[in-house]
Amino acid sequence: TEIYNIAIDGPAGAGKSTIARSVAEKLHFVYVDTGAMYRAMALHFLRMGITPTDEAAISQATKDVKVTISYENGEQQVILNGENVSGLIRTGEVSDMASATSVYMPVREKLVELQKELARKENVIMDGRDIGTCVLPDADLKIYLTASSRVRAKRRFAQLKDNQGEFTLEDIEKDIIERDNRDMNREHSPLKQAEDAILLDSSSLPKKMVEERILELFLERK
Ligand code: C5P
């Protein structure tokens, strides 16, 4: 039987994970969140007290670490050296470290290998920054999902309701722009739209419509 792969790339906060998760549910595909893998690696580097500029230490630590995923009630869990760290990777500290350390080739190679292997075995919808360009160049459908930095900052702000006091919308937008710049301008596998990817902008389109469009596009191609 044929295996189908869908790639979704785009900047932080464009709605990739929510949309990919729900498309996966409709198609009975496995949703693979690759950002969670970079976050688990980052948590490991933080725990080891490694500075994000210390490339040698990061390369060595990457060799010694094991990151895998599993599924619990359909939700992806990320496992770091046997420990389920899914609940520990959504902090600002881990976000910053993931963004800073995803620039290194050894880190990327290790995770890309795992991602390719997952996509060979199962129908997946995978989201990240380099899925259409590097991880799954032959994906059946590639989407580049974006939104204005202001819209993405507003969404992030709403998610942070609990401790909104600490940050202003401007702080969050600045942080988002900084992370985008780092992802788009790095040497290895920068974030960019693959030539054969379809551009969707979620600033003006409600999530439901983005989702329907992706389903439609996939069914046309399959
Ligand atoms: O998507 P998420 O915000 O969880 O990703 C965390 C960081 O991991 C991103 O800022 C990006 O630098 C990196 N990343 C990447 N390639 C991917 C997925 C994430 O470089 N495929």
Image (tube, rainbow, N blue to C red):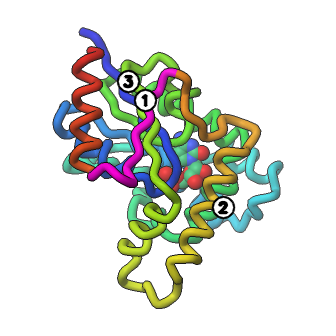
Kindly indicate whether the residue at mark 2 contacts the one at mark 3 (C-beta within 8 angstroms).
no
Q: Using the image as rendered, state which of residue 102 and residue 121 is in the foreground.
A: 102
Mark 2 CB within 8 Å of ligand 1: no
Q: Residue furthest top?
A: 1
Q: State how far apart marks 2 and 1 are (Cα).
A: 25 Å
Q: State how far apart marks 3 and 1 are (Cα).
A: 8 Å
User: What span is in magenta?
Assistant: 196-206
Say if the magenta span includes residue 201: yes
Q: Position of residue 31 (x, y in %)?
A: 32, 39
Vertical order, 186 against 141 (above or below): below
Amino acid type at circle 2 is: Glu
Position of 196 with respect to 70 (left or right) is right
Q: Report helix, strand or loop for mark 3.
A: strand
In primary-sequence order, the first of circles 3 and 1 is 3
Q: Position of residue 163 (x, y in %)?
A: 43, 85
Question: Quadrant of the image for the N terminus?
Answer: top left
